[in-house]
């Protein structure tokens, strides 16, 4: 069924980005235009979810070329759900960033640059979910790359430029590989349209199809931060402003996961690489979470948990069953809201305390109970504490793995449980140190680490353990700047000097709490949501609804 609404989630943010550039000298109007645009996208996405579920995939051919030579946008159950969740998340992050701009007087994130870039990012995410051909998907990734580099380097600090450079280099290389893969696919099949490729790839020699699949999986695994192609993420995300880190963590890797899910089910339904995907999922889970438990900065810890939990989604895709795909879709929805919400809360921590280092933080639960609760609830959800959506998503994936019954699937179920426990350990350590212990204890720890650093001969550095926290060379180097005569650098001393900001930015807090509430709402509606993801998974594996909507314009 053709529906002009399908194009609006892409067109509206792009038009709003252009308008916001015109309104450079009117920041209040810029903010209004951005918020209205994202509200409109969320409303359209909600309509598309209903129509895709009731009437089948909504396809739109644009560009004025005869079908199937034009550019197709398709909103089926999967893409419309991803579009709705991404619209809600980007709206919450925009509201948060508006609050941060008011608080920080836009020194680190100029509104004239921020708003157009953010809207282009939103348009790129929407276009990626709706794209029905490989080249349009490539264009989406380039839109994301352009906008994300601007957002990553806002403020122009050395750390942000360095992190942005790493991010751009990795993504430019992946884009080059993607272009080569697109050329190979077109040379082998004569088309880049997903619906046409679904039939033509099946007719290729097995070795050729396998090579094309490997090329595409490599590109999308870099975007999704699947191990061992996840090395770039922990160093790129934590240096950015809080709202930028939040939207990157919540959405950009999920675009890669979506691309893997779409191509694996539609283009390579009988893939011989399912075992390789399961192995990659296993390594992504374990390596990511082991990196998380070793961190002493909350942002870096969450960046590693982000990598780790991508493994759950790849687990569901690799199972290649309806239950596995359904579990993967549910977990993507859950993780977008949880990860974004947590990074927004950590942004509030940084605003409140001036740092996200566990070496420096303490007593935040007493200082701000709302902030403590805002971190605790999504952290427990991320760890999979019942009956929250994280627990339900993990149970769905574990059930799918047990149902599949292979040895590797059982290993992954066990690895998923271990990863949940280690996630709980990592977030509990962060809670204990940053929120539960007193600022006095944090101050004493800082001084102890500083003393050990000063006493250690040469390059040798002792390790300091305080409770469950372990501090090593990086933290000791950081501690070199902590002295008794520089109280402003220590949370305890800042408290003593009454130098800590005691106001709570209401807009930022409301946006963060909104996403925390949305994550809890997923628990309430988990039954209907799982029913929806089950139907989406059946559509993906059958392929017929998508193919009929694109090639014939009919709904199933």
Image: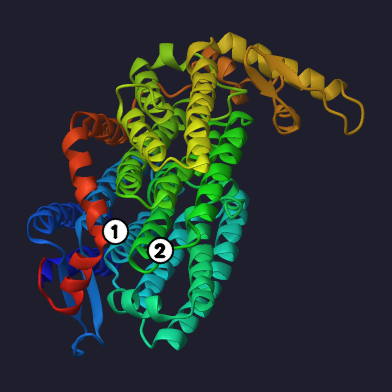
Residue carrying label 1: 541
Report whether residue 306 is seen: yes
Q: Please name whichever residue, 431 or 199, is drawn nearer the observer in this view of the structure.
A: 199
The first of marks 1 and 2 along the sequence is 2
Instruction: Residue 242: name its quadrant.
Output: top left
Where does residue 423 sit, x and y in percent of width and height? 50, 28
- Secondary element at tag 2: loop
In the rendered image, the quadrant that contains the N terminus is bottom left
Q: Please name whichever residue, 107 or 427, is drawn nearer the observer in this view of the structure.
A: 427
Do tag 1 and tag 2 residues touch (Cβ < 8 Å)? no
* 3 relative position to 489: left or right: left
Residue 223 vs 216, above or below: the answer is above
Residue at 72% in and 21% down: 483
Residue carrying label 2: 270
* 182 relative position to 547: left or right: right
Q: Please name whichever residue, 132 or 457, is drawn nearer the observer in this view of the structure.
A: 132
Residue at 84% in and 23% down: 454
Where does residue 226 sit, x and y in percent of width and height? 53, 51
Q: Please name whichever residue, 400 or 24, is drawn nearer the observer in this view of the structure.
A: 400
User: How many numbered badges does the structure rendering display?
Assistant: 2
Residue 474 vs 10, above or below: the answer is above
Residue at 10% in and 55% down: 47
Q: Residues within 10 Å of mark 2 (few under 14, many from 20)?
A: few
Report whether residue 225 is seen: no
Q: Residues within 10 Å of mark 1 (few under 14, many from 20)?
A: some
Give me the disc on residue 69: none
Residue at 27% in and 59% down: 540
- Secondary element at tag 1: helix
Where does residue 413 sit, x and y in percent of width and height? 47, 34
Instruction: Residue 530: name its quadrant.
Output: top left
Residue 438 vs 174, above or below: the answer is above
* 372 relative position to 530: left or right: right
């Amino acid at each position: 069924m053709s529906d002009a609404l399908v194009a609006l989630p892409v067109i509206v943010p792009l038009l709003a980005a252009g308008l916001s550039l015109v309104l450079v000298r009117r920041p209040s109007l810029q903010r209004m235009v951005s918020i209205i645009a994202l509200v409109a996208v969320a409303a359209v996405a909600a309509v598309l979810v209903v129509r895709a579920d009731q009437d089948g995939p909504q396809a739109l051919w644009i560009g004025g070329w005869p079908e199937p030579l034009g550019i197709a946008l398709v909103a089926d159950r999967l893409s419309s759900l991803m579009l709705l969740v991404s619209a809600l998340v980007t709206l919450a992050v925009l509201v948060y960033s508006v609050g941060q701009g008011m608080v920080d007087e836009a020194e680190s994130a100029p509104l004239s640059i921020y708003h157009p870039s953010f809207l282009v990012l939103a348009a790129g995410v929407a276009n990626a979910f709706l794209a029905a051909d490989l080249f349009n998907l490539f264009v989406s990734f380039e839109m994301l790359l352009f906008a994300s580099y601007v957002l990553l380097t806002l403020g122009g600090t050395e750390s942000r430029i360095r992190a942005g450079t790493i991010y751009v280099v990795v993504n430019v290389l992946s884009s080059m590989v993607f272009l080569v893969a697109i050329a190979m696919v077109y040379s082998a099949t004569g088309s880049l349209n997903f619906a046409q490729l679904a039939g033509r790839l099946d007719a290729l020699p097995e070795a050729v199809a396998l090579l094309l699949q490997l090329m595409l999986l490599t590109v999308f695994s870099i975007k999704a931060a699947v191990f061992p192609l996840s090395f770039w993420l922990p160093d790129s995300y934590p240096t950015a402003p809080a709202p930028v880190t939040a939207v990157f963590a919540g959405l950009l890797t999920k675009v890669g996961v979506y691309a893997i899910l779409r191509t694996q089910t539609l283009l390579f339904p009988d893939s011989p690489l399912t075992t390789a995907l399961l192995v990659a999922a296993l390594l992504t889970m374990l390596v990511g979470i082991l990196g998380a438990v070793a961190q002493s900065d909350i942002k870096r810890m969450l960046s590693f948990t982000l990598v780790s939990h991508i493994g759950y989604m790849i687990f569901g895709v690799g199972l290649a069953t309806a239950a596995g795909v359904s579990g993967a879709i549910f977990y993507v929805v859950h993780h977008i809201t949880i990860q974004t919400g947590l990074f927004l809360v950590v942004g509030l921590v940084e605003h409140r305390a001036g740092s996200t280092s566990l070496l420096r933080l303490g007593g935040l639960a007493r200082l701000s109970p709302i902030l403590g609760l805002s971190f605790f609830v999504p952290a427990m959800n991320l760890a999979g504490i019942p009956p929250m959506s994280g627990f339900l998503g993990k149970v769905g994936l574990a059930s799918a793995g047990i149902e599949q019954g292979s040895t590797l699937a059982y290993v992954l179920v066990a690895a998923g449980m271990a990863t949940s426990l280690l996630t709980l350990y990592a977030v509990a350590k962060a809670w204990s140190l940053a929120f539960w212990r007193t600022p006095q204890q944090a101050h004493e720890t800082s001084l102890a680490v500083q003393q050990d650093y000063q006493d250690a001969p040469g390059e040798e550095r002792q390790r300091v353990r305080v409770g469950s926290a372990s501090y090593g060379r990086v933290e000791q180097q950081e501690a070199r700047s902590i002295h008794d005569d520089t109280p402003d650098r220590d949370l305890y001393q800042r408290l003593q000097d009454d130098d800590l900001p005691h106001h709570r930015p209401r807009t930022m807090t409301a946006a963060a709490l909104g996403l925390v509430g949305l994550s809890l709402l997923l628990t309430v509606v988990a039954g209907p949501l799982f029913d929806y993801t089950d139907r989406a998974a059946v559509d993906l594996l059958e392929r017929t609804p998508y193919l009929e909507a694109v090639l014939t314009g009919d709904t199933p």
